[in-house]
Amino acid sequence: MFLYFRHIFIMFISFFSARIVLDKLGVVDFGIQNVVGGMAGMFAFFRSSLSNATQRFLSIALGKNSEEELSKTFRQHQSIYIVITLVVLALLESVGLYFFYNKLVIPIDRLDAAFWVFQLTIASLCITLLSVVYDAVLIAHENMKIYSYVSVFEALAKLAIAFGIAFSPVDRLISYAFLLFCVALSIRLFYTFYCKRLYKECSFTFLWEKQEIKNTFAFISWNFIGTAVWAINNNGIDILLNLFFGPIVNAAKGVASQVSFAITNFSNGFIVSVQPQLIKSYAAKDFDYLYTLFFKSSKYSFILLWFLCFPFFFVIDDVLSIWLKQVPDYAGSFVFLILLYSLVNSLNQPIWTLAQAVGKLRGYICIGSAVFLMVFPISYILLRQGFSPNAVFETNVIVRVFYLITVFVIIRKYIPVSIYRYFKETLLPIILVCIVSVVPVMALGTYISNMAYNHWISCAFAFLWNTIVIFLCGLSRNERVLVKSKILNRMKR
């Protein structure tokens, strides 16, 4: 509950900040910030792989209670990150800069400002890569509460920046990028100082041992590939939209991504809590519990997200017009399609957890990534043929469905998951909930289409009807009994 309330607090601050930033920068500069920052951010896609690897080796050293191994791991990994940072810096200042000047569509009068945004984004990226090891140290020592305090500070700082850029004596876009860099730098300096004060192993001298490097990269390599494909699709879409439609459409994509991130985080919190149970049950060879948990967590992940998304679908444009003073073109359709993608993708998280539990990632990553990577070339072909920007996100949804089918087939080679049970216990309730929820609400929307506030009436009815449908069609009889007993117990208290 603490994490959820913290997330709600940060979400509202982020929404408010985005509204102010879009208003103060304007649609064009907001789009430039999104696409230029996203292009440099493509090189940060392996941060999670690096962080997970470092956490793993640090945790092993902590388990052995070996201060020498702990210190050695810290020094070796920090040395690796220094080399990686130099390589990324060289790529961005050569290939990235060439792409910036020769491929991106940026108004000529905003080119200098966009250049400084690019440079400040690179600086923030390098700082982030150099301090990944400190993040890993905190997680390995299970010192998680510090993240809560720092994330609240970061959100409040960005809100202050959003208000402050209006009083900037220089270009607002450059000021915004510089102040974001200052926030990133201050947070990283705090983490570094905090870890050095608290943990003895955080003392650095350069160390380069070939065997250690080999072990580290063997651990992260396959996960690295999967993360890279995700980054290419996500940031590649930003670049495609810029090449064909310019920064205004990038602004719409930025708005849609923020809305999607806020809503999907609520359902993601559920699957994170289930992941350890899935992995532990596989390790214990308790396959009955493993399958039950897999089917239920897949169903719940979708239903929790559907519960939030379905009523919101009817008032997307109204909410955007209230939230933003100037709504970019295509923002409403982008939000709808990105949320639709998130609904499909919610079924992937439990499958990915099973793959991690099994540890056989080679086929999963190679074949699955090959399917998912088709989004980029298909989108490029469609845009070349004159399709609207929506075609990119529609392609993303369709390809993700094929991706789910592919990885499910792959995982069944290692764990004999029943297709019949998966359909009966997961897909069938989801299909019933969607059909039974949508049809009456759409019929009502048609009937009241000429009434005032018809969208909000549909939204309210969708929320109430959707809740009833989820309870009756989405939950099994035992689950309904459990929910009833929980509600009655709460009422008695």
Image (cartoon, rainbow, N blue to C red):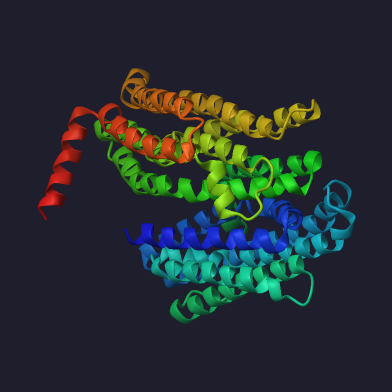
Q: Residue furthest left?
A: 492
Q: Quadrant of residue 434?
A: top left
Residue appearing at x 37%, y 68% in the figure:
65
Residue appearing at x 60%, y 41% in the figure:
332
Location of residue 16 with respect to 347 vertically, above or below: below
Location of residue 286 with respect to 137 vertically, above or below: above
Residue appearing at x 59%, y 27% in the figure:
399
Location of residue 430 with respect to 252 vertically, above or below: above
Residue 82 in the image, given as x and y percentages of width and height: 67, 65
Q: Is residue 92 found left or right of 207 in the rendered image?
A: right
Q: Residue furthest bottom?
A: 197
Residue 15 in the image, given as x and y percentages of width and height: 54, 58
- Of the pair 96 and 317, the residue shown nearer to us: 317
Q: Is residue 388 found left or right of 324 in the rendered image?
A: right
Q: Quadrant of residue 466?
A: top left
Q: Residue furthest front?
A: 451
Residue appearing at x 53%, y 26% in the figure:
401
Residue 287 in the image, given as x and y percentages of width and height: 28, 32
Q: Is residue 48 found left or right of 127 in the rendered image?
A: left
Q: Residue furthest top?
A: 420
Location of residue 317 with respect to 204 vertically, above or below: above
- Of the pair 145 and 396, the residue shown nearer to us: 396
